[in-house]
Image (tube, rainbow, N blue to C red):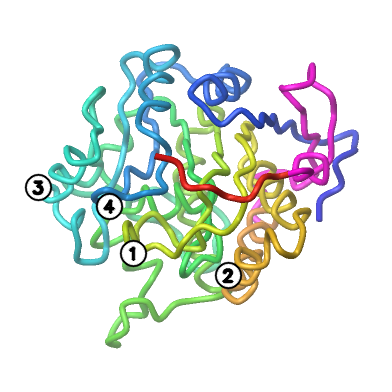
Amino acid sequence: MSDCIGKNASLVYFTRELSAEGLIKAYEKVCGSITGKVGVKLHTGEQHGPNIIPREWVKALFAKDLQGASIIETNTYYDGDRYTTDLHRKTLEVNGWDFCPVDILDEEGTVELPVKGGKWFDRMSVGSHLVNYDSMVALTHFKGHTQGGFGGSNKNIGIGCADGRIGKAWIHTTPGQPDQWDIAKEEFMERMTESTKASIDFFGEHVTYVNVMRNMSVSCDCEGLAAEPVVTPNVGILSSTDILAIDQACIDIVYAMTEEEHHALVERIETRHGLRQLSYMKELGMGNDNYILIDLDNGGKHITPQDAAKDLKPFVAQE
């Protein structure tokens, strides 16, 4: 895993404080380039989803630092409670995302953004409203993922900004055959990552990342109440302006846990070949896998993933 010491390292901030205050503390370290009209890419979850980032934390962050911003989402590729805009809005209401505007990016169609240097795509179809924003905050619930192995900032953007009918189909499905989810393993990771690159290249320096390592089921939040039970301990909140560095740091912390703590999540990551997300981001020049992990709870001390994973408490479901 990554070397945390280096001259050309990216900065990743870390707090164990899983609360609204911790979220605000982490975000405020990386928000310097967030200007103009701001979209916050957040997975708002299926109805009554148990593991999404708590609504009250997000509400507090918006009140303190993101007044005037919108949550941005897209409709799903699968048939469910967020498949159409009308169904999606009902789900948003059920889950209480009513304290700020929520912009369903593909409500009024799509736009294509260039993919520079990709091997699967030269363009990606995203929700047309995405280009109305000046800055993007990727506020990500880090967890497992049925197809991707894990879902960090890369998955949140790559799947979450691709529109529900065209872009997500390009990522998931080989045309002309019946399996909606036939693209998997390395190819899926690469397609998803190229989609992410299209969106973050559009925003340039005006994008930042926060990953919340809490309620880390091996299942994505797309699975809602059907998600596998959480067995991995909660860790904390990370933030960075480097997408590869933050996802790499989260993975390094997972691997630094004990076997008992991380066996389920590591099995999900490795059976899906999820680590290809990281190596492909590096190949595409999307970020730096060499980072310095900065402990916000201890005066900015430089720590290792092993330090961040030390003395974790067994997961207990929270109301």
Residue type at numbered disc 4: Glu
Residues shaded magenta: 284-311
> Is 181 on the left-hand or right-hand side of 97?
right
Q: Nearer the viewer, mark 3 or mark 4?
A: 4
Q: Residues within 10 Å of mark 4 (few under 14, many from 20)?
A: many
When asked about the image quadrant of residue 131, the answer is top left
Say what secondary structure mark 4 lies in: loop
Q: Tag on residue 46? A: 4
Looking at the image, tell me whether mark 1 or mark 2 is earlier in sequence order.
1
Residue type at numbered disc 3: Asp
Looking at the image, tell me whether mark 4 or mark 1 is earlier in sequence order.
4
Q: Tag on residue 270? A: none
Please say if the residues under marks 4 and 1 sit with CB atoms less than 8 Å apart: no
Q: Residues within 10 Å of mark 1 (few under 14, many from 20)?
A: few
Foreground of the two, 233 or 118:
233
Looking at the image, tell me whether mark 3 or mark 1 is earlier in sequence order.
3
Inter-mark Cα distance, 2 to 4: 21 Å
Inter-mark Cα distance, 3 to 4: 14 Å
Looking at the image, tell me whether mark 3 or mark 2 is earlier in sequence order.
3
Say above or below: 99 vs 130.
Answer: above
Say what secondary structure mark 1 lies in: helix
Please say if the residues under marks 1 and 2 sit with CB atoms less than 8 Å apart: no
Q: Nearer the viewer, mark 4 or mark 1?
A: 1
Foreground of the two, 4 or 142:
142
Q: Tag on residue 268? A: 2
